[in-house]
Image (cartoon, rainbow, N blue to C red):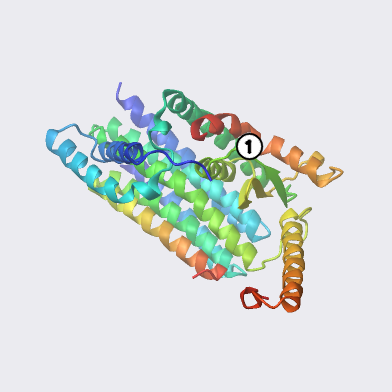
Amino acid sequence: MIEVLSWIGQALILIGTFFYFLSTLGLIRMPDVYNRMQTSTKSATLGSLGVIIGVGLWAVGKGYSVSWISMTIIIAAFILLTNPISAHVLIKAAYEKGIPLWHGSVVDKYREFLEREEKERDAETQAASQAGTQGENDAGEVRT
Amino acid sequence: MEKRASTLSRYIYTVIVLFVIWLFFVSTLKLQEVLAGLAFSLIIAAFTYPVFTKAGLQNLHPKRVAYAIAYVPYFLWAMIMANLDVAYRVLHPKRPIRPGIVRCRTILKSDTGKLGLANSITLTPGTITLDVRGDDYFIHWIWVQDDVLNAEDEEASIKAASRYITQPFEKFLKVIFG
Amino acid sequence: MTPMYVYLLLIGIAVVLSMYRVFRGPTAVDRLVAVDIMTTLTVGMMVLYALYYGRMIYLSVALVYAVLAFAGVIAFARYLEGGI
């Protein structure tokens, strides 16, 4: 009966390694850094879930204590929670660094938003500096 | 900015969460382990509760916990579907991608809920959260759908993108995080 | 234990394949993404090794490695962004 767990665990590990391969393949095939992140982060996270939970099940199937499962669940939950955060930080870094989108990209709403925000801020600072030059007080606090 | 719960309820909530994590970690019910974990949870929670939570014990409302448990299989299913989609895009010889950055809007109010939504978005079909400004999410999408691309104005495209990206999760996260 | 060798070999090949992007990647962020994926793969490998040796304490090593790799990737990304 308990051998069934070990077979399920091994199947999960195989599926996980398949997704690992998928993530590295995406890393190699995709044209720009954003699409690479798209394919690799998701597949690597699901692959880790498969491999790590699979190891827990396999260990119980082999007759080790049940605490393997709780420990592997902790590791899997940690990876599930932190991987999207590091993906988010990386993609933000790529955008802030000015790496251009792939030439086949169709729309970039973020650039439009940033440009509009920049324009509004320029208008505000201009208005503020004009007010500062006209009025006598509070001119020192306006940063241009 | 959401309202903070009372100090005591936040402290007790932190202790409970830390203690449950500890129980998972040692995965035994021996008296000495449980007592040590309880003592350290009480001490550590005294330092960390101001940054740990804002809502306090309200998070452990039975309805929220039930929705959180129901969210796990739903989310895992969405994640497996996302990965099969990614597998199709990677393995297809012509590489069918049409990337772009779109903007969509959420109805969630709390910061924790926004974080959970951003993480859920990042792990599911072809989308990565690039930035969050107030209620607006900027999302890199690997295959921008037609009705988002061909929308007449900004609002229509935001609405179309929200229907594809944020709304599948919001019905759960709205209850879980408030 | 033979299936174990197969799994470890498969993950090892995946790590080597992602090494291609570390060396080739046109920008620094490309390399960092590849390193991030490699750390995730390494955590999987460490968990498998823990089962190979049959010691539960090695799982803690994998957990600590995951924490440190996450912190390292965040720090490097903030540095590239110009935030530090």
Q: Is residue A79 left or right of residue B87?
A: left
Chain assignment, label 1: B
Q: Residue at x 62, y 70 (%)?
A: C26
Q: Is residue A143 visible?
A: no
Q: Nearer the viewer, residue C84 or C65?
A: C84
Q: Is residue B164 left or right of residue B26?
A: right
- Residue A47: x and y in percent read 48, 43
Q: Residue furthest left?
A: B32
Check disc 1 and give the amino acid type: Ile
The answer to whether residue B62 is visible is yes
Furthest residue in direction front, as rendered: A136
B135 lies left or right of B14: right
Give the image location of residue A70, x and y in percent.
Answer: 31, 36
* Relative to C29, residue C8 above or below: above
Query: In which image quadrant can residue B88 be found?
Result: top right
Q: Quick one: quadrant of the N terminus of chain C?
A: top left
Q: Secondary structure at mark 1?
A: loop
Q: Quadrant of residue B15?
A: top left
Residue sitting at the far right = B152
Classify A101 as above or below B72.
below
Q: Residue at x 30, y 30 (%)?
A: A61
Spot occupied by residue B102 in the image (x, y as percentages of width and height):
72, 49
Name the residue nearer the viewer: A93 or A47. Answer: A93
Residue labelled with disc 1 = B107
Vertical position of residue A102 compared to residue B110: above or below: below
Total tally of numbered discs in the picture: 1
Residue A48 lies in quadrant: top left
* Residue A1 location (% of width, % of height): 30, 21
